[in-house]
Amino acid sequence: MIVVLKHGVTEEKKAQLIAWLQALGLKIHISDGEFQTVLGLIGDTTNVDIDLVESLEIVDSVKRVTEPFKCCNRKFHPDDMIVDVNGVKVGGGNFVMIAGPCSVESEEQIVAVAKAVKASGANMLRGGAFKPRTSPYDFAGLKATGLEYLRIARQETGLPIVTELMNIMDLPLFEDVDVIQVGARNMQNFDLLRELGHLDKPILLKRGLANTLKELLMSAEYIMASGNERVMLCERGIRTFSDYTRNTLDLSAVPMLHQLTHLPIIVDPSHATGIAKLVPPMALAATAGGADGLIIEVHNDPIHALCDGAQSLRPEEFDELANKVRAIREVVA
């Protein structure tokens, strides 16, 4: 349920209404906009007398929310969420480019790539230290050592680091990570999501290979309902009957999600296509379609990459793409 307050309501009257609603056993999500305040009522609202609430002098309107997701619902939070990552803002008109290798392979590799992507305009550095692989025989990351190399790259460049957490047990190692990524395979790892909800740290939540938008939003709800509202969603392609690309990039998800939620939407054209030559056109399409950012794999030697070299851009290719993205942004801004 949503209670929209009239413009100019005093803090005292607003606090009295909130206290009364909380006494009914409800959690109240407060969204203060420029022209109105929206109270999102979370919990069992069957005991709330809508007519009584609507008759109050300070209340403009009362609406029921039929969607199962509440905290991440745009009806609860009409204005775009802006997620601040150590000074890098994402959402609300702020566009971010996250770039780096699929996996951290050495200190020299990650530092070299970090310097290259920063020179091209990247705002954050991605790199996998813990890698979920389909085959148990594939390279699965350097783990704690990889995290240390990422921190060194951050120290060298100033770029905030984005890396994937796979297991709750490893959470203490991620204390100094700027953005924790939840991979597609863990999108419905609800115990992990609840735990991330207790952190005051940005979370990049990737859509699962075969999950609907509603399921993606419900996973975001797990994090936000536990207290952490600093969530970014990522469209990274879904499994379809297509046999020429790794996945199918669902670009329609971007404008649809913007209608449903106030959270920033990031697009990953690298995992979506699996083919380096397809990454630039899909990245440009995502930018034109209203994405709040891109996460792109960049490797200084893709042929010899230990993970996903086929979908990785070389630094000079990323530089060319970054220039085109900025040109598209000027058109659509």
Image: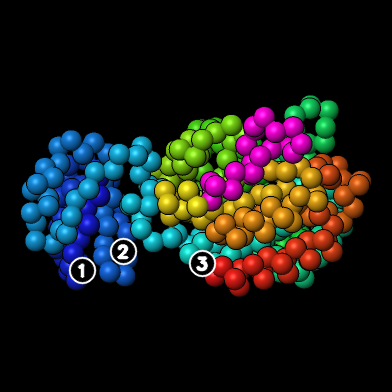
Residue topped by disc 1? 7
For mark 3, give the secondary structure.
Answer: loop
Per the model, the C-alpha gap separating discs 2 and 1 is 10 Å
Q: Is residue 319 magenta?
A: no
Q: Which of marks 3 and 2 is nearer the N terminus?
A: 2
Q: Badge 3, how many Cα within 10 Å: few under 14, some, many 20+? A: some
Q: Which of 208 and 137 lies nearest the eye of the viewer?
A: 208
What's the amino acid at mark 2?
A: Asp
Relative to 51, 138 lies left or right: right
- Residue depicted at x 69% and y 37%: 247
Image quarter hosting the N terminus: top left
For mark 2, give the secondary structure.
Answer: strand
What's the amino acid at mark 1?
A: His
Q: Is residue 98 visible?
A: no
Q: Which of marks 3 and 1 is nearer the N terminus?
A: 1
Residue topped by disc 2? 32
In which quadrant of the rendered view does residue 310 lie? top right
What's the amino acid at mark 3?
A: Gly
Give the mark toward the camera: 2 or 1. 1
Q: x, y (%) of residue 287?
A: 61, 60
Q: Badge 2, how many Cα within 10 Å: few under 14, some, many 20+? A: some
